[in-house]
Image (spheres, rainbow, N blue to C red):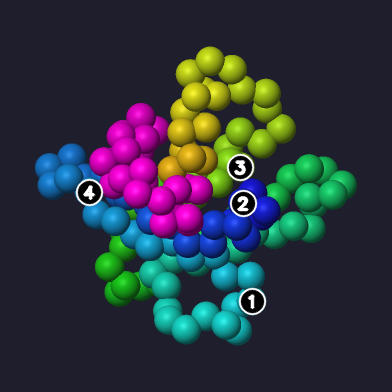
Amino acid sequence: MEALARRAPQFVLPVPHETQGAEMHFLQWVFDPASRTSTPHTTITHHLDLADDKGLVLMQGHVVDDRGVKPEHAKWLAVCLQRFYGAWEAGVELQGERKERAEARKQLLEWFAAGDARFSVEKLLEEAERMG
């Protein structure tokens, strides 16, 4: 997940709404918190203490009050982050539809990072709908 985040440190993630389409949220990985220039509405910290011994990485999320995001939307964004950056499938050999979906999500991420014209918000929304 970290290697992909370093190659593609910025992305957009949708929060679907049943009655009004979706709103897009800009995602940015920051490996040095001192370099951050603006205040995010949500921060997610990955705790790596158990990664080597147990193969486990704990995530801690924090939603900043009065920044316009609901906790349930922040939770959805955290799930999307894991799925698009591959953590959801880590250590599992995927087959069939799950493998195709994981590859499609990774492709969208890479297209976005490269500024490739094949990236489209419509395809991103389709993947989000499949996850939700």
Residue 69, given in percent of the width and then of the height, sits at: 31, 63
Give the Cα separation between the discs numbered 3 and 1: 21 Å
Circles 4 and 3: CB atoms closer than 8 Å: no
Is residue 75 visible in the rendered image? The answer is no
- Name the image quarter holding residue 88: top right
Residue that mark 3 sits on: 87
Let me know if residue 117 is in the magenta part: yes
Along the polypeptide, which appears first: circle 1 or circle 4?
4
**Badge 2 density bin: few <14, some 14–19, many ≥20, Cα 10 Å:** some
Residues tagged 2 and 4 counted as in contact (Cβ below 8 A): no
Mark 3 in CB contact with mark 2 (< 8 angstroms):
no
Examine the image and state in which quarter residue 132 appears.
top left
Q: Earlier in the sequence, mark 2 or mark 1?
A: 2
Contact, mark 3 vs mark 1 (Cβ under 8 Å): no
Element under label 4?
strand
> Residue 89 at x, y = what percent?
61, 33
Amino acid on which the number 2 mark rests in the picture: Leu
- Residue 122 seen: yes
Q: Residues within 10 Å of mark 3 (few under 14, many from 20)?
A: some
Question: What separation in Å lies between label 2 and label 1 (alpha carbons)?
Answer: 17 Å
Q: Which residue is mark 4?
A: 22
Magenta segment: does it hold 26?
no
- For label 2, the residue is 4
Camera-side residue: 61 or 13? Answer: 13
